[in-house]
Image: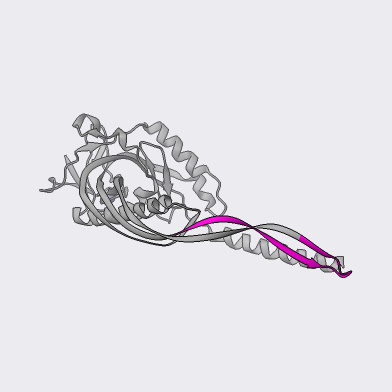
Amino acid sequence: MQFACEQCGASVDFAGVSSAACPYCASPSVVERAPAPGRALPSFVLAFTSDEARARTTLGTFLGRRRWFSDGAIARAQVSGLRGVYVPAYLYSAVARTTYSASIGEHYEETEETTSTDASGKTTTSTRTVTRTEHCPLAGLHVGYVTDVVVSGSAGLGDDELQRVEPFDLRQLRRHAPAIISGWIAEDFARDQAACLARSRTEAMDSIGTRLRRFMPGDNHSDLTWSTRLEWEGMEPILVPMWIAAARYHEDKPPLRVVINGQTGAVHGEIPISWLRVVLAVLLLVGLGAAIYVLTRHGR
Ligand SMILES: [Zn+2]
């Protein structure tokens, strides 16, 4: 049975899970709705490797971690609705054909002789080694595979949030079967595939830039420019495992959302900053500065 959240728009299948709240925004207003026609269907799944007890431990450790400027109430936050969700995503792949040019710097050492004359008229000669750099132009073609770009296709979990708990071990991808996801909440593909493709290309280009910089020979390089053509592009609809929790730390503030990668245990949440603590730290520093100033003046 398919349900739609009236607050965040996520369309979820509770698959036997007894719950009446949206796993993403905890809104209780979910209404029964027929699956959207023409929606993408997952062809591969990354299965959960952790159970709820382990996710709860990860969450507790994350919330209890001491941070300098975070709100102290976080450590005493009430966790409500920790849910395991199969989140829809696209696995993008392509062949990237890149032509590039750069200036490659090669270090070499030279011995320099210096002669100096001191006050008594005695001259001394000393040698020292200096490092110089020789530059030469380099241009070429770099061909590589892009195989690990995963972008969110979810209405409830944005791509930025997903990226914070990546990477996944994609070697564990299995062909989708209802048995894998039974007993878990699964969300339907919600994002426009064309928009996801554009986002994937951006992420692919970023990773090509990083790879190309690492590929450059020599001791350093400058003026690196490149242009890439993406060929043989593929967009595979997949499901990725994610724990999503809402932690209420203050009565009149929205709950803190924490996401945990259901495969690797990587965790992310935007811990709110306590401005009171920031102000106190600044005052303390100013006070310390003043004290040191006064003390050193007295010392003279
Ligand atoms: Zn919702």
Q: Main secondary structure of the magenta part?
A: strand
Q: Residue at x 27, y 39 (%)?
A: 19
Quarter occupied by the N terminus: top left
123 within the magenta span? yes
From which residue to which does the magenta span run? 104-125
Q: Is residue 281 visible?
A: yes
Q: Foreground: 90 or 206?
A: 206
Q: Is residue 6 visible?
A: no
Q: Is residue 126 above or below residue 231?
A: below
Q: Whole-percent x and y of residue 91?
A: 26, 45
Q: Foreground: 4 or 270?
A: 270
56 lies left or right of 43: right
195 lies left or right of 293: left
Q: Residue furthest left?
A: 37
Q: Foreground: 144 or 120?
A: 120
The image quadrant that residue 147 belongs to is: top left
Q: Whole-percent x and y of residue 124?
A: 80, 62
Q: Residue at x 48, y 44 (%)?
A: 63
